[in-house]
Image (cartoon, rainbow, N blue to C red):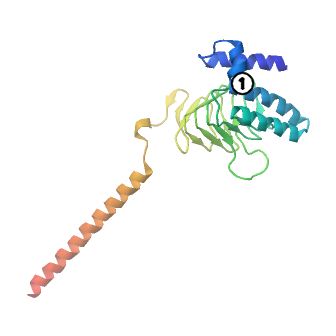
Amino acid sequence: MFFQQLKRDIEAVFERDPAAKSVWEVILCYPGFHAIQFHRVAHWLYKKNWVVLARFISQLSRFLTGIEIHPGAKIGQGLFIDHGMGVVIGETAEIGDNVTIYQGVTLGGTGKEKGKRHPTIGNNVVISAGAKVLGSFTVGDNSKIGAGAVVVKPVPPNCTVVGVPGRVVIREGQRVDDLLHDQIPDPVAEMLQCLQRKIEMLENRIAQLEGREQGRDHQNL
């Protein structure tokens, strides 16, 4: 079983990283691959209730690779963590088969709740650099999470999610809204524009009142 998983993890690198040249390069030079192997051992110990030793191995893995995977997390076959620095995977996270995770991704919780508090990631999911998936919900099979997205709600299968907070922009190959990535709204600019409109309205109102007062003065004269 262990060697089958090892073989599949190596194959996953070659399938999804054109820079990989040899098996020895993957074994010796890929921190994502190293972190996954450390986790296999730590998770086995965690299930045997060797919690402290399992946590120690996960912390050693974090020190060596920059990738933190809690030993309680459940990971399927063929996970590929590309580059990987800053990746955090929480205790109750579950990851399906053939998932790709890029650097800076967090699979985390939203508070101090007990029980299942981290996301479940389906098969063949891609989570791009810097994305945060927070909470106990499911990201469906074959979905993609865009770079920098913050996902706090369930994602159906075969969807693409972008933005903060994350929202579905493609479902089953069809665009579901007209989001343009070079025209993402700027909330600060929108607020300033709103204030400007209010100031102009007040200035017009003041000018009207001053005009009425001046008219009354002329009439009195």
Q: In this rendering, is residue 208 above or below 163?
A: below
Q: What residue type is disc 1 on?
A: Phe
Quadrant hosting residue 182: top left
Write the residue at 33% across / 63% down: 198
- Local packing at callout 1 (Cα closer than 10 Å; few below 14, some 14-19, many 20+) is many
Quadrant hosting residue 214: bottom left
Image quarter where the N terminus lies is top right
Q: What element carries label 1?
A: helix
Q: In this rendering, is residue 173 above or below 151?
A: above
Is residue 161 visible in the rendered structure shown here? yes
Question: Whole-percent x and y of residue 16?
Answer: 62, 19
Question: Whole-percent x and y of residue 64?
Answer: 73, 32
Question: Whole-percent x and y of residue 154?
Answer: 64, 40
Image quarter where the C terminus lies is bottom left
Write the residue at 39% across / 52% down: 189
Question: Whole-percent x and y of residue 215?
Answer: 13, 79
Give the left or right position of residue 106, taking residue 198 as reference. right
Residue sitting farthest toward the bottom: 220
Is residue 180 visible in the rendered structure shown here? no
Quadrant hosting residue 72: top right
Foreground: 107 or 61? 61
Give the left or right position of residue 5, taking residue 217 as reference. right
Foreground: 54 or 147? 54
Q: In this rendering, is residue 213 above or below 106?
A: below
Question: Mark 1 sits on what residue?
Answer: 33
Write the residue at 40% across / 56% down: 191
Write the residue at 53% across / 26% down: 173
Residue sitting farthest toward the left: 221
Foreground: 100 or 103? 103
